Image (cartoon, coloured by chain):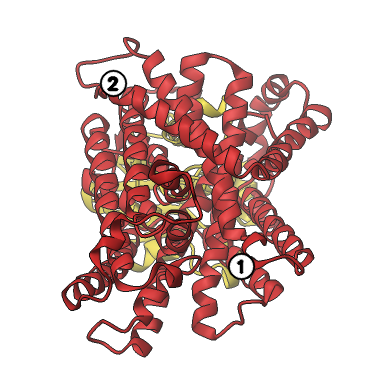
Chain colours: A yellow, B red
Amino acid sequence: MHVIVATDGSRASLVGARQFKWIADSREITDVTVLAVVSPYAAAPFANELGEQSVKPFSELSFSDDAKAAVDIVAAEFDGWGPTIHKEVRSGSPAQEIIRAAEDLDADLISMASGSRGLSRTILLGSTASRVQHSAPCPVLVCRPTTHSERATS
Amino acid sequence: MVMSADPHVENKTVLKRSITVKQLYFYVVGDVLGSGIYVLVGLVAAAVGGAFWMAFLAGVAIATVTGLAYAELVTKYPQAAGASLYINKAFRSPVLTFFITICMLSANMAAVGSLSAGFVRYLGGLIGLPEDAIWGAALLAVAFVVLITIVNLIGITESVVANVIMTFIEISGLVIVVIIGVIALVEGVNDPSVLLQFSPDGGGGPILAVLAGVSLAFFAMTGFENAANVAEETLDPSRAYPRALIGGMVTAGIVYVLVSIAAALAVPIETLAGNTLLEVIEADLFFIPASIMLVVFGIIAMIAISNTALVTVVAQSRILFGMARENVVPAVFAKVHPTRRSPYVALLFGAAIVAALLVIGAAIRTSQAGIPVDEQLDIVDRLATITVVFLLFIYALVIVACLKLRGKDETADTYRANTVLLILGIIGNLAVLVYTLIDDPDALFWVAGLLAVGVVLYLFQNFFGKKKPDLAAAARVSGDVERSATEPPPADKEP
């Protein structure tokens, strides 16, 4: 079984990855691909809020480096878990690229976090998670931290 | 950096770039075409006279040479920061790099202001807004700024397909104008000799008349530099950039020259002067009645302007976002919305500054009620001029940087621009810059005002921000990841 774990550089996505690990049975899983998507035309193509916030000169700004760093941190969560871990950074519209990655890798599951709650969900249209689950070629696990999962993963 | 020792973890990250030459070409064309011709054609016509296509031609030539320098630099340094990166590589002066970044930010803010005011000219034509409704127009322009900011907050500008569709709509409007021009030529509406006429009130002969129009026509060419922002995501940048940049700008240039010739042939210059392309439609030469075409064309123009405004707002907020990451301006500008991943503080701040520019413009206009219409402030003109002043300076410096970086970081793949053309480009950019400032010294107050915003942010960060960002970051490192497991993610704190 090949699972895609998506990260957008947010804390929610890291917690979501832990939650997935807590839910899933590593014996069933052969491969995990940790995926981040850079959106080149967006105001912030990628914002990594995980790990060390390196202070870089504006001129050295690299969004794909930021995405790589986020992928590394999420991938490190799966150290010694069992399955082979792959890392991938794509570029384009996040939902579309996650779906494409699932098609390209012939994935059996996509795991991603949904940060949308309350106001932003009602006002700011659908989130990436809802768009992915709408047209994904495989099952989609939308992780949402609960008090129970947090106790178990901490 | 977290690196794994686990044999099951592949240490190599697969990087998949997505932007092709074609997409980049459409990005350049879409970005350039929307910006100026719809908004400024009347002002350029007023400054030059019937021969105003020459001003567009000169503007296109200078901008395309600048594009060559960008193409060379981007193939050497395919990173996201554009001009700031090149200036930093060439001069290694943090102060100069900071100054250029602030100039770029200011140019983008002024451009958004000019575009919103231009948008309202078309909207006003559609809804029948009286021309003397200064505050009504200002309010609509501010509403437009708010709207494009919201679109960017949601982040629906990411779509490549939408970009291509927008570009086709932009071109369709200009094709209509060119068709009208052909009809006008066949029907003999205006004597073709109008194309060689220069405005009598310039008084300085053809060269000065063209120069007077170039700085405004130049605004129509800006936006191509945004292509450098997506360098990281472009497939084979050393081949893609020269093709897409030069191809895109030549396309835009041909369209501009044809549109200005068509406009000059279809309507008297006095009618066009100071007005929009709607005048050309109103001449009713097209085979669809003018009453319908006015609405259709108005909507096309508004879509075109919106597209460019959206891209400009993205560029503007990205500069603030990047500077905040660098700790040059307060860190709050690097905050992204938990779900939409858009830098909302930077977006809202940018919108506030642009709104302030529009309100200041309206206030000045109100105080000028007594003086002749010709001498009253034209906010579209003023903000476009300010944008051009900033950009001409940046462009000239980018070309200098390009020449200075010759021989460094070159590979077999590096595109090499023609040196003679580049030197002509520096002269061209500076000549237009000097002329613009002599012609319109008041623009300097606005330039200073916008630069002051950047300096204030810098000082604020210096006095109230974290003094030792590196140490603070280092202290946070280890605790960060662990803590987030027990703490609810930030998304939960939303109302």
Residue B420 image label: 2
Image quadrant where one finds the C terminus of chain B: bottom right
Q: Is residue B15 left or right of residue B380?
A: left
Q: Earlier in the sequence, mark 2 or mark 1?
A: 1
Q: Residue furthest top?
A: B407
In which image quadrant can residue B436 be found?
top right
Q: Is residue B8 left or right of residue B366?
A: left
User: Of residues B422 and B483, which is closer to you in this image?
Assistant: B422
Residue B388 image label: none
Q: Is B213 drawn above or below residue B309 in the view shown?
A: above
In which image quadrant can residue B332 be found?
top right
Q: Is B162 drawn above or below residue B417 in the view shown?
A: below
Residue B399 placed where, x, y %?
40, 25
In three-dimensional space, the C-alpha distance between marks 2 and 1, rounded to whole angstroms, equals 42 Å
- Residue at mark 1: B141
Residue at point 35%, 73% (across, down): B267
Three-letter amino acid code at the position of disc 1: Ala
Q: Residue furthest right?
A: B463
Q: Is residue A13 left or right of residue B408?
A: right
Q: Is A82 drawn above or below residue A35 in the view shown?
A: above
The chain carrying label 2 is: B
Residue at point 66%, 68% (across, down): B138
Residue B331 placed where, x, y %?
69, 37
Q: Nearer the viewer, mark 2 or mark 1?
A: 2
Q: Is residue B448 visible?
A: yes
Q: Are marks 2 and 1 in contact (CB under 8 Å)?
A: no
Mark 2: give few (<14), some (14-19) or many (20+) Cα within 10 Å.
few
Residue B299 placed where, x, y %?
41, 76
The chain carrying label 1 is: B
Q: Which SS class for mark 2?
A: helix
